[in-house]
């Protein structure tokens, strides 16, 4: 309690001499001025808390390492440290702009994953199932080419070799397979979209 | 005596850091020891 009436310079001296309660008194005495100063510059309570903490970490280190110069007064010295840290913060923020989540701006508007949701997965499964049934409607030679090309990812040259026909024939079968598939889809009014 | 009808102006609330921040600083100060060796300072933080 006696600390409350002591001037800053004496409290600083006591703190350097090992009296930890002197620091508590100094913080209590000046916290609102220093915090208010920081808040007036950054307008963010959490950020102000961070800068306030960093300011006093510097104060503690300087005092404990006996490199505090008593020429100036304590409060203006701490304010200068806080001011420098605020400037540092803005420098960093300029280098690495930070977007905060707000009602208008959400980072999730710009981030998506390619995994289908349950509904999308069900539709995709249904489309695959319907398409398989449609393939069974095609003539065997056309179905064979289409399956090799689309499902097994073979080139038309490989398909031609495997089926013993020319590349042009394989291409023709593919063309007719697709035309026939379209016809069946239109005829049965099937919707194959995700 | 004349009545005062004006409301007492609410004092502007002083902004203060969180209690946790102050508590951290006081504990940090207690835990920190600094020693000068040559031109450099060595920091020791007791757990």
Image: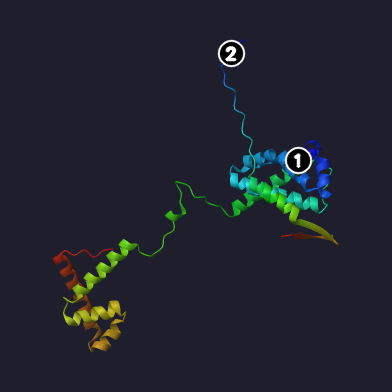
Q: Chain of mark 2?
A: B
Task: Looking at the picture, tell me which residue is in the foreground, B7 or A132.
Answer: B7
Q: Residue at x 28, y 76 (%)?
A: A150
Residue A128: x percent and y percent?
26, 70
Whether marks 2 and 1 lie on the same chain? no
Mark-to-mark CA distance, 2 and 1 = 43 Å
Screen quadrant of the N terminus of chain A: top right
| Mark 1 burial class by Cα count in 10 Å: few <14, some 14-19, many 20+ | some
Which element is circle 1 on?
Answer: helix
Do we see residue B14 in this rendering?
yes
**Quadrant of the rendered image containing residue A156:** bottom left
Residue A15: x percent and y percent?
80, 47
Instruction: State the residue position of label 2.
Output: B3
Which element is circle 2 on?
Answer: loop
Task: Looking at the picture, tell me which residue is in the foreground, A41 or B38.
Answer: B38
User: What is the number of the mark on residue A75?
Assistant: 1
Residue B36: x percent and y percent?
84, 59
Screen quadrant of the C terminus of chain A: bottom left
Q: Nearer the viewer, mark 2 or mark 1?
A: 2
| Mark 2 burial class by Cα count in 10 Å: few <14, some 14-19, many 20+ | few
Tell which residue pokes out farthest to the top in this image.
B1
Q: Is residue A104 above or below residue B41?
A: above
Q: Residue at x 64, y 45 (%)?
A: B19
**Quadrant of the rendered image containing residue A122:** bottom left
Q: Chain of mark 1?
A: A
Q: Residue at x 26, y 86 (%)?
A: A160
Tell which residue pokes out farthest to the front in this image.
A1
């Amino acid at each position: 309690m006696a600390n409350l009436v002591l001037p800053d310079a004496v409290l600083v001296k006591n703190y350097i001499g090992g009296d930890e309660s002197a620091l508590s008194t100094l913080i209590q005495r000046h916290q609102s001025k220093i915090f208010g100063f920081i808040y007036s510059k950054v307008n963010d309570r959490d950020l102000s808390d961070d800068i306030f903490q960093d300011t006093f970490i510097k104060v503690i280190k300087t005092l404990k390492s006996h490199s505090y110069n008593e020429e100036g007064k304590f409060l203006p010295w701490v304010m200068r440290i806080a001011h420098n840290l605020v400037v540092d913060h803005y420098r960093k923020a300029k280098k690495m702009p930070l977007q905060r989540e707000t009602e208008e701006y959400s980072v999730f508007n710009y981030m998506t994953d390619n995994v289908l949701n349950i509904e999308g997965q069900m539709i995709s499964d249904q489309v695959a199932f319907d398409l398989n049934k449609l393939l069974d409607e095609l003539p065997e030679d056309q179905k064979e080419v289409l399956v090799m090309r689309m499902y097994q990812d073979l080139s038309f040259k490989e398909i031609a070799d495997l089926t013993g026909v020319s590349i042009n024939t394989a291409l023709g079968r593919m063309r007719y397979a697709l035309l026939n598939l379209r016809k069946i889809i239109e005829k049965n009014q099937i919707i194959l979209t995700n | 005596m004349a009545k005062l009808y004006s409301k007492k102006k609410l004092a502007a609330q002083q902004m203060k850091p969180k209690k946790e921040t102050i508590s951290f600083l006081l504990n940090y100060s207690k835990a920190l020891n600094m020693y000068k060796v040559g031109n450099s300072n060595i920091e020791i933080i007791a757990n």
